[in-house]
C-alpha cells in the first residue's frame, strides 16, 4: 500500500492505518507513561486523544503536500 493511500485512510478514520502511519512515519514511540488526573478546570481545555491524532495527521499531510508541490515545481514539465 502506498504512503499516500495509508495517509488518506488514516485521515479518514481507519484506526489501524492511523497507528501504523504514526509508528512508521510520525516518529511515534511506545512508552509507559503514567498520567495523573488534572485539576477540574484544566480537564475542560484538553483535546481528546482522537482530536490530537487527527491534528497530527493533518499536519503531516500538509507537510507531505508541500513537499510534493516543491518537488513538482523543481521537476515540472517545461512549456506549461
Image: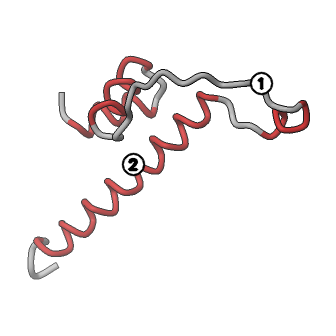
Q: Is residue 45 left or right of residue 24?
A: right
- On residue 59, the disc is none
Q: Looking at this view, name the residue that lies furthest to the bottom.
A: 79
User: Which of label 1 and label 2 is nearer to you?
Assistant: 1
Residue 65 lies, with reference to residue 20, above or below; the image says below
Residue 66 lies, with reference to residue 9, above or below; the image says below
Q: Looking at this view, name the residue that lies furthest to the right.
A: 41
- Which residue appears at 48% of the width and 46% of the height? 58
- Which residue appears at 27% of the width and 65% of the height? 69
User: Mark 2 — residue?
Assistant: 61
Disc 2 crowd rating (10 Å Cα; few below 14, some 14-19, many 20+) is some
User: Mark 1 — residue?
Assistant: 37
Q: Position of residue 29 (x, y in %)?
A: 37, 31
Q: Looking at this view, name the residue that lies furthest to the top.
A: 16
- Which residue appears at 90% of the width and 37% of the height? 41
Q: Quadrant of the C terminus?
A: bottom left
Image quarter of residue 2:
top left
User: Which of 6 and 22 lies nearest the eye of the viewer?
Assistant: 22
Q: Is residue 41 left or right of residue 47?
A: right
Q: Position of residue 48 (x, y in %)?
A: 67, 30
Compare marks 1 and 2 and give the one earlier in the sequence.
1
Q: Where is residue 44 in the image (x, y as percent from the top left)?
A: 84, 34
Q: Label 2's element?
A: helix
Contact flag, marks 1 and 2 (Cβ < 8 Å): no
Amino acid at each position: 500500500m502506498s504512503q499516500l493511500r495509508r495517509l488518506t485512510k488514516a485521515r479518514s478514520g481507519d484506526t489501524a492505518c492511523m497507528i501504523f502511519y504514526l509508528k512508521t512515519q510520525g516518529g511515534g514511540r511506545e512508552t509507559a507513561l503514567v498520567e495523573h488526573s488534572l485539576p477540574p478546570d484544566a480537564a475542560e481545555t484538553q483535546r481528546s486523544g482522537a482530536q490530537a491524532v487527527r491534528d497530527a495527521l493533518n499536519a503531516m499531510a500538509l507537510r507531505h503536500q508541500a513537499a510534493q508541490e516543491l518537488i513538482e515545481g523543481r521537476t515540472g514539465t517545461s512549456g506549461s
